[in-house]
Image (tube, rainbow, N blue to C red):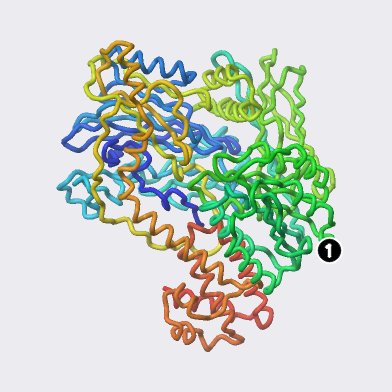
Amino acid sequence: MATNTIFSRHRSTSLFGLIIKQTEQPIPLKEVSVEAEIKACLLGLKSVLKYTNDSSDPAEVLFRFPVEESSAVVGLTAIIDGRRIKADIKEKEEARAAYDDAIASGQSAALGEEKTGDVFSITLGNLSPQKDAEIHLQVVAELPIDAEENVRFSLPSVFKSRYTPTGSSDPLANVSDSGSQVSSAHSSSYSRFQLNILEPQRIATIVSPTHTLNCTNGEDKIEVTLSDQKPADKDLVVLIQHKEPYQPCAVVEEGTDTGFMSQKAVMVNFFPKFDQLENDCEFIFLVDRSGSMSGQFIQSASETLILFMKSLPENCYFNIVGFGSRYEQLFPEVSVPYSQSTLDKAVAHLTGLQANLGGTELLSPLDFIFKSKPQGGLSRQVFVLTDGAVSNTDACVQMVKQNNKSARCFTFGIGSGVSTALVEGLAHAGNGSAEFVKEGERLQPKVIRSLKRALQPALTDVSLEFKIDGKPEILQCPQTLPPIFAGEKLVVYALVKAKSDKLTGKAVLKGKLLQKSISDTVEFKSGAGELPPVSTVHHLAAKALIKDWEHEGKDSREIVKLSVESSVVSSRTAFIAVDEENLKPIEGALKTFVVQAKAPYTFQRQVHGGYPTKKRKRSTSRDRKKSNKKAPTKKMQVCGDMGDVQGGPPMLSFVVAKGSRSKSGAERCEYQRQSQCDNALLDYDEDSDDDSESLNESTSLQSTLSSIIGAQQADGSWKINSALARFVGKTLQEVESGCPTECQGVTALLWATLLILELLHTQYVDDLEEWELVGAKAEAWTKKQSISPGDTSLDNMKVAANKFLA
């Protein structure tokens, strides 16, 4: 099993959890209490995390928690030094006003805004030496389904890095620049862990690759606890295999409270099974080469497209078309057969790719593609990569829609200036999928994910009809349904205003699979089980509805109302936390901190079967340089929307009080006028030296992986040469002489290819999502090389390759 740990590549583990703001040092997590419940693929979780400031100095504490699109933090309360501070959601301006009022009253307060939608952050006053802090979290999530059809629950260990004061005898600790130590070990333990899995009659197996579990079967649930409550030194992973994984299911959640939460909520989950069908394709990649793509964007596109070319299967056709004010195709034909010669020409073209085609005009290249029929009657797959917008979006979308019977369209939007209407419109019209890449993110995994979708059939023209007794008012979310690709689920919510206490009905899914009509039905009724820890279905339904409304440009007041009632933050609302128990005025200057949200760790990590998961060693010790930057003297902005810092990635900003607010309103406004955004990145940048080594290491590893992939031939094999020797860390002579002579039918190509496969599976596990298709093509090639059915030489060579690289 491999886990794709994006987080570990970019930032140290001190980025998330409870940390000392000034030094970025983690406060030690001593205990973790978790209560969770899973029904179908939905998770409702409550967790209590207990921290202790073991240092001799007071600490201003900052709590950061990452959230993914399919999960949400819906409740957070902190108990600092015995004082309770609860974060609520309010309209942004109202939250800012509440913040200012709290400061004027001598209370500490914090304002949190999700600028990127993937990090929740809040500052919680000062934690005294040797004092405790408790963080009470409520989280909801849609759990992923892995390659073995398991529903996967993962509790991240991201909070569990240990902060050890200077002088500690811990041999595993590493000295930091602050004189304290950051341990690679974890001292926290689960004081309580209980996971209830509902509908036990549907469960086949429950296993954990990371911990030993105790499972107690009950009439209405399976209670899962840990056999060993000792240190939580790694992610806790639980894999749940259903007896009928492709059987659709539904969850009904009764309403609570008032407003939005008072309605009944229904979740339906469809996970259709597609027969394995051969789907040879024609692939055409449209890449934006307008002037705005210059620099990192075009470089990333070039590297990604080389990976894309190497990942293409044999027996396909392809072409690359660059567009700007005009368009240029690599090959004059609409597409050409995939071979070693055409692949070499494509790689040479992409190596010198430039953003030199002027403006952005997409309609003409689309017309060039669609006016010709796909080569050989193959299924056509069109990929569009752009960072901008066009003036005729509707015309482009209509052209794709008119041709969606013979072609699917997959789109990629890069950066903050891309048109979501264009990227999502083309994908929806072309029965494909849309991906967005923020600055700092890697494009490669998203392109390969779309390529895997393109290689398989999909259920298109998807519609869902809710039929509920009594014909109540029903609000479905999301309202527009995407295609369903093989191995992916579709989760849809419905809010029901029913007069009856009992809710009975069914949901009927319809679509087309290769022009054949497909339908499926799931029945549901109320009283079939609830999710006690958190109102999971309501919260996730609200998240889906908010996303729909924001995309549609719905009235801001409606979005704010829904966000507040459901406790799910939106772009128009903010978290506000006020320490109502501490009335002592605070001394110091008011300051705004901006945290760049990079590489969040999530509940959703992918699992893949295959080779053993021996990971490459990544250095955790480093020499840290002290920052020479001085603390800012300017007072920072409180009122007005700072937005994103121009020219940089999206930001998550929050304001924390550090000073007495006995000043007049006019003086407060003067503070605000003096504020400038040029100091906003200071606290984030202070640890840039700390991360430089890990970032350089990550860049080096990615560069090596790109070189390995770039050396693969069109048929999936590698040659023995000096470059391959460098990849495996041997001399050319050692590689050539290392091939086992007892294996019959051995060729240099086969030995080289097995060495690279072993290298990828043992040292590049974290990057599996990028090289998975490359590896699959190589595996298929090696199987063709066996002498006869049942020949063992291939297996023997795999063993030899493993020993050679050990």
* Residue that appears at 78% across and 60% down: 334
- Horizontal arrangement in the rendering, residue 801 relative to residue 125 (left or right): right
Q: Is residue 529 visible?
A: no
Q: In which quarter of the view is residue 422 placed?
A: top right
Q: Is residue 95 left or right of residue 419?
A: left
Q: Is residue 552 above or below residue 338?
A: above
* Any part of residue 381 in sight: yes
* Residue at 41% in and 19% down: 96
Q: Nearer the viewer, residue 369 or 250?
A: 369
- Left or right: residue 20 versus residue 517 is left
Q: 10 Å neighbourhood of mark 1: few (<14), some, or many (≥20)?
A: few
**Label 1 sits on what residue type?**
Gly
* Whole-percent x, y for residue 85 in the image: 34, 21
Q: Position of residue 584 (x, y in %)?
A: 23, 16
Secondary structure of residue under mark 1: helix
Given residues 150 and 8, the one toward you in this image is 8
Residue occupied by mark 1: 376
Q: Is residue 288 above or below residue 655?
A: below
* 667, above or below 654, in the image: above
Q: Quadrant of residue 158?
A: top left
Q: Residue at x 76, y 17 (%)?
A: 470
Question: In what quadrant of the picture does the C terminus appear?
Answer: bottom left
Quadrant location of residue 667? Answer: top left
Measured from the top left, where is residue 777 in percent x and y? 64, 67
